[in-house]
Image (spheres, helix red, strand yellow):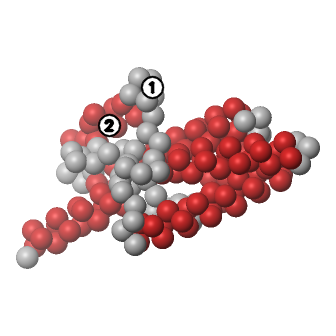
């Protein structure tokens, strides 16, 4: 990873690493929430896959918010349905999709502050070492792992290159 930081052609691999780290983080966080609410944590990969299109334009912090918000409703559904895990998972997906569309519409209408509806881990949270190395060596200045999207970095770099050619 440190070798990657010193290379000139590191943009694409850095974006791929960012995407892989954030995908693993949201799946782990979702499994934690499911376990915490007596839901099946093995559903986390299925839920992440099912939500891929719905939350592709969201930051990791917003995905964490959606997962937290929907897990509470899924736990309620689990109790109401006599511990039916399938019904709870379906309720969770439905709520995540509904709330994701709501966030997208608020964002398009400029009714959403960049700080709203986000869950960033506590500063005391012990980060995995791979994430620490990524944050200290590869993430460009001015970008936040939690509140930005890798796509925003790609767009900024493309614009920077285009401006350099003009």
Q: Earlier in the sequence, mark 2 or mark 1?
A: 1
Q: CA distance from mark 2 to mark 1?
A: 14 Å
Where residue 100 appears, as percent x and y from the top left, is 55, 62
Few, some or many residues within 10 Å of mark 2 (<14, 14–19, 20+): some
Q: Which mark is residue 125?
A: 1
Residue at x-position 45% and y-position 25%? 125
Q: Which mark is residue 135?
A: 2
Residue at x-position 54% and y-position 65%? 102
Q: Secondary structure at mark 1?
A: loop
Where residue 37 appears, as percent x and y from the top left, is 72, 36
Few, some or many residues within 10 Å of mark 1 (<14, 14–19, 20+): few
Q: Which mark is residue 134?
A: none
Q: Quadrant of residue 132?
A: top left
Q: Is residue 132 left or right of residue 39?
A: left
Q: Nearer the viewer, residue 108 or 11?
A: 108
Residue at x-position 36% and y-position 68%? 110
Q: Is residue 109 visible?
A: yes
Q: Secondary structure at mark 2?
A: helix
Where residue 66 appears, as percent x and y from the top left, is 57, 51
Q: Which quadrant is home to the C terminus? A: bottom left
In the picture shown, does residue 163 fall above or below 56? below
């Amino acid at each position: 990873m440190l070798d990657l930081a010193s290379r000139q052609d590191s943009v694409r691999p850095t974006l791929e690493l960012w995407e892989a780290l954030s995908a693993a983080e949201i799946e782990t966080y979702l499994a934690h929430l499911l376990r915490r609410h007596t839901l099946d944590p093995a559903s986390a990969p299925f839920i992440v896959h099912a939500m891929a299109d719905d939350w592709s334009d969201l930051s990791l912090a917003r995905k964490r918010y959606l997962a937290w918000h929907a897990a509470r409703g899924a736990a309620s559904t689990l109790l109401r349905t006599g511990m039916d895990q399938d019904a709870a998972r379906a309720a969770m997906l439905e709520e995540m999709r509904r709330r994701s569309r709501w966030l997208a519409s608020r964002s398009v209408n400029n009714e959403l502050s960049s700080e709203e509806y986000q869950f960033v881990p506590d500063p005391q949270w012990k980060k995995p070492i791979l994430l620490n190395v990524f944050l200290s060596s590869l993430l460009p200045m001015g970008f936040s792992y939690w509140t930005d999207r890798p796509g925003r970095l790609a767009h900024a770099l493309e614009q920077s290159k285009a401006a350099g050619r003009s």
